[in-house]
Image (tube, rainbow, N blue to C red):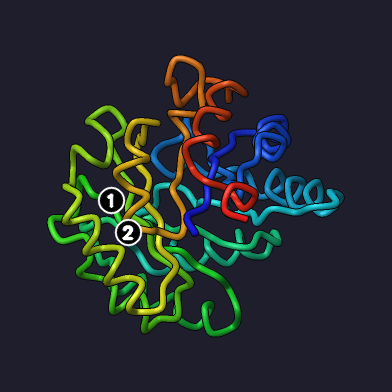
Amino acid sequence: MTRLLASVANLDELALAARGGADILDLKDPKAGALGAWAPDDIARAVDTVHLWPVRPPLSATVGDLPMEPAAVTDRVARTWACGVDYVKIGLVPSGDPAACVAALAPDARRGARIVAVLFADLWDDAGRLLPDIARAGFAGAMLDTAGKGSGGLLRQKDIGQLARFVERARALGLLTGLAGSLAVRDIAALLPLAPDYLGFRTALCAGADRGGALDPAALAAVRSAVPNHADIA
């Protein structure tokens, strides 16, 4: 079943997204880049907040837009994982040495860190090239997103066939799969048949499709109604 991941910028949005039925709450600062990170203290507060709820959706947290340098990547992932989230998302870009970064994170994955690799459809010609390395390193999942939020959404960067191959290859390697990148409500019907584990949203959840603005309950409701939830399927 495909779940709805909502990226939230603060604790107020965290609660709003949970009330609106988001399946996964993704801690991300949209004003700080494609994978802008929350401060560690704020991540820890979010974890503490969610632990008080009777029903606790999984939390993921981004680590920021980092250079592909193993020391920088492993340090940030370790610090973010230590905050108590369920998943840590790390963006992989072609510049630098992304393969070395993946290999350097393997010990953390073996120790239990659930790491999700984010590959950017507008930066990688072959977005699935690193998937075998990601799986061998013990990552929990891989998702396809976009880095340049003003250059068009995911479906402008890759066609349905390319997205289907990415999802199928990642799934065959035992990875959780996700698709995101300025997705609009109109994109959902085309992406659901690919059966990714989750679809990620930020822009479509905000008033006026302004990803740097505040989450809008009506926009969230529109996305939630387009992505079948547990109750719809039961």
Residue 23 drawn at (x, y percent): 61, 49
State the residue at coordinates (48%, 68%). 74
Describe residue 47's horizontal placement relative to residue 215 as left or right.
Answer: right
Viewer-side residue, 23 vs 146: 23
Circle 1 sits on which residue? 120
Report the residue at 45% width, 74% height from top: 139
Judged left or right of residue 143, residue 153 is left
Identity of the residue drawn at 86% across and 50% down: 52
- Residue 174's place in the image compared with 3, above or below, is below
70 sits to left or right of 122: right
Please name the amino acid that badge 2 sits on: Leu
Q: For the residue labelled by badge 2, is the local secondary structure a helix, a strand or a loop? A: strand
- Crowd tier of the residue under label 2, counting other residues whose Cα lies within 10 Å: few below 14, some 14–19, many 20 or above: many
Q: Name the residue under label 2.
A: 92
Q: Is mark 1 on a helix, strand or loop?
A: strand
- In the displayed orientation, state which residue is furthest to the top: 208
For label 1, the crowd category at 10 Å Cα-Cα, with few meaning under 14, some 14 to 19 and many 20 or more, is many
Cα gap from disc 1 to disc 2, whole angstroms: 7 Å
| Label 1 close to label 2 by CB (< 8 Å) | yes
Tell me the number on the disc at residue 100: none
Q: Where is residue 120 in the image (x, y as percent from the top left)?
A: 28, 50
